[in-house]
Amino acid sequence: MFKKISPIDKELKKLYKKEQSLINKKLNKKSSKLDEFLSDKVPQGLQKTLNTAFTKAFNTIFSKGTGVIEKTYNKGKIDDNYKINSYIADIKNNRKSLKTFNKSSSDKINLAISGVSGVSLGVLGIGLPDIALFTAIMLKSIYQISLNYGYDYNTQEEKHFILLLIQGALSTGEDFEKADKEVEFFIKNGYTQQYISVEDNISKTANCLSGELLYMKFLQGVPIVGAVGGAYDFVYTKQVLDYAKIKYYKRFLINRKKNNEIISNCL
């Protein structure tokens, strides 16, 4: 009479609650008093300058910088851990074995690097040069998350997913709602809802970043006081990591469930 709930469905149910909590915060987030204070102090053209800097950073990293980032962590070890975790999950088929994929010691390290670098450059009044470093740390963090779940970040499809994750993580209100729907479509189908080149998706992501980080990057360009703006590198990197971990785990669980159903139907 009662259908047994699978470990994957139990994990998905728990994940949905965590996901909904994040969604509610994103939809109801209001501008801070600091943003309101800085709104009329930011020089015209700064967002365009930030947009250009973020676009250049993504293009450079995607075209020739990924190899440099990979030197900062052991990709082979993460790949091996994924294979071992997959084997254990297949054998044990319980929630504990699934949760193993969701554990990573790299998050705290990347967040610490992001925060320290942002504050250090902020004290010196360096804002724009921090963008390349901030982008590299953000992508490094997502790369390591993707490897934990067995996804190759070097493919064109995965680059799209990563860019969509950043758009969703750093959007609020109606913009977040649209971005999150794009992420959900990709999770279910494995491709973007509408055709878009990686270059155009980079432009969308850069525009999202320049809009969200506008005030903090302006503040970071002011010596001493800029440390406050630089500290937000940690805040924004954490937002990206929190969102990416939820969506990658959800994608992983849904795909694993589909594969299990296919195997079950073939037996």
Image (spheres, grey):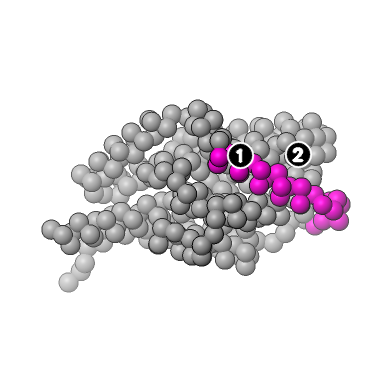
| Residue shown at 48% from the left, 41% from the top | 143
**Residue range of the region highlighted in magenta in the rendering:** 36-63
Q: Where is residue 178 drawn, in percent x and y?
A: 57, 66
Number of numbered discs overlaid on the protein picture: 2
Label 2 sits on a secondary structure element that is loop
- How far from the left and from the top, in percent, is residue 4? 22, 63
Residue at 50% in and 43% down: 142
Query: In which quadrant of the rendered image does the N terminus lie?
Result: bottom left
The residue type indicated by label 1 comes to: Thr
One can see residue 165 in this view:
no
Residue found 33% across the figure and 56% down from its top: 255
Q: Is residue 165 magenta?
A: no
- Please give the label number shown on residue 127: 2
Toward the viewer: 123 or 45?
45
Q: Main secondary structure of the magenta part?
A: helix
Image quadrant where one finds the C terminus:
bottom left
